Amino acid sequence: MTHVQSGPTCTQILAWFGADVIKIERPGEGDATRSQLRDIPDVDSLYFTMLNSNKRSVTLNPKTDAGARIFTRLIEECDVLVENYAPGAIDRMGFPWEKIQQINPRMIYASVKGFGPGPYEDCKVYENVAQCTGGAASTTGEVDSLPLVTGAQIGDSGTGMHLVAGILAALFHREKSGRGQRVTCAMQDAVLNLCRVKLRDQQRLARGPLMEYPQFLNGGFSHAVPRAGNASGGGHPGSVVRCKGWETDPDAYIYVIAQAGAFPALARVIGHEDWLNDPEFNTPEARLHKLDYVFSEIEKWTTTMDKMDVMATLNPLNVPNGPILSMKELAEEPALRETGTVVEVEHPERGKYLTVGNPIKLSDSPAEVRRSPLLGEHTDEVLRDVLGLDDKEIHAARREGAI
Ligand code: COA
């Protein structure tokens, strides 16, 4: 019972782990993302196809009599029910947790909601709302500029991944106890969990200035953890610097971390051997006050080279770095194709499309990525094979609009 992104991310991972995921969709309409941001008219969007691989689609309206009976049978037969509808939506369908538990005490019932119990529990929430309310936006962005949301879908996909962990733990618990349980993940909580280091910094701030933040040198701190641009969060100074071609290529940049242990090699390679014996530069504490200058000198060197050549030069020197890779570069990267992280899939209506495969690799259980299902493609098959309904019952349910 998942839609949009957070729930489908979770069940897609479970499907890649081998679960038979039956996606229940509203008859006639299906998951709203099927038609959102379409790139080809009347064909399931990439939004849908990239989040619903390896699933079977069943159309079912549990709000009809026949639909409620079929939904009850599904609860009896299945192991896990995952949903991410608005708060209370499944209850309003007539299936509160108490009833689900009664129907199948082994059922694991997992939900994503925007907020946990409290003043906001009834709110509907999308990705950017979660990023704003979970601490990501207040700590992301340029110094002295607007709060920013990130391109990584930490609210939706991030919460979906958290939910996977909860479901797997509950399945393991059920193996021991015989009982199912309720698993819930709030998007605000998941984002805050991913922003854990910023809550660390909030507490450090109470004891003194945060030396690795740009505000340490430029303007000071207020009462809360500020936005720190691209400053490295790990305690080692880092920065995005330009590479050759930056004037025309918006991704000709590389992130360089001036980690203390590798600093001598970094200084040498950029032609600043002089820093090694200069007390103004040869300790992290001394450099802290000159980071803008240090990175501008690093940049003088990086702008002479292609970002991938900078990477190839810095890696053997143990200088941590990361070229800014565009989505185009990632889509075309042979190593990612090789590992199945980027996969090309054939779809009967849209033809070939690219998707991100399972990022979690299991040595004995490799995931084969299969295309997303068409709306209701497996309704008859699931009702017949999983629930044991005969043609007459299926026909009657269809006539009632239940499927
Ligand atoms: N048959 C009949 N009705 C169905 C159905 C089905 N198979 N599946 C869903 N519906 C109904 C629901 O029962 C609900 O009806 P109700 O309002 O009468 O109870 C209705 O569809 C709309 O569901 P809702 O969740 O309110 O959709 P929305 O488009 O208004 O809101 C979200 C979308 C994402 C904001 C909301 O679902 C939400 O907050 N979800 C939890 C947080 C979340 O996952 N957010 C991130 C999404 S990536």
Image (cartoon, grey):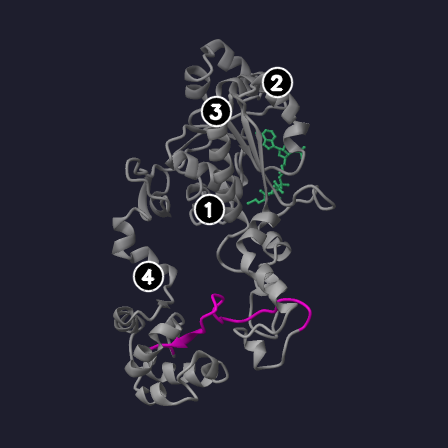
Residue 124 is tagged as none
Q: Is residue 64 left or right of residue 253?
A: right
- Which residue position holds label 4? 329
Distance from Cα at disc 3 to Cα at disc 1: 38 Å
Quadrant of the displayed image that contains ligand 1:
top right
The magenta region covers 222-246
Q: Is residue 318 left or right of residue 87?
A: left
Which numbered disc, 2 or 3, marks the residue closer to the eye? 3
Mark earlier in primary sequence (3, 1):
1
- Which residue position holds label 2? 102
Which numbered disc, 2 or 4, marks the residue closer to the eye? 2
Q: Is residue 4 magenta?
A: no
The secondary element bearing badge 3 is classed as helix
SS majority, magenta? loop
Residue type (three-letter) at the residue carrying disc 2: Gln
Which numbered disc, 3 or 4, marks the residue closer to the eye? 3
- Which residue position holds label 1? 47
> Which of the 4 image quadrants contains residue 297?
bottom left
Distance from Cα at disc 3 to Cα at disc 4: 46 Å
Distance from Cα at disc 2 to Cα at disc 3: 20 Å
Residue 176 is tagged as 3
Which numbered disc, 1 or 2, marks the residue closer to the eye? 2
> Residue at position x 37%, y 37% from top?
16
Residue type (three-letter) at the residue carrying disc 1: Tyr
Mark earlier in primary sequence (2, 3):
2
> Residue at position x 54%, y 18% from top?
70
Callout 3 touching callout 1 (CB < 8 Å) = no
The secondary element bearing badge 2 is classed as helix
Look at the image and tell me whether residue 16 can be seen: yes
Q: Quadrant of the N terminus?
A: top right
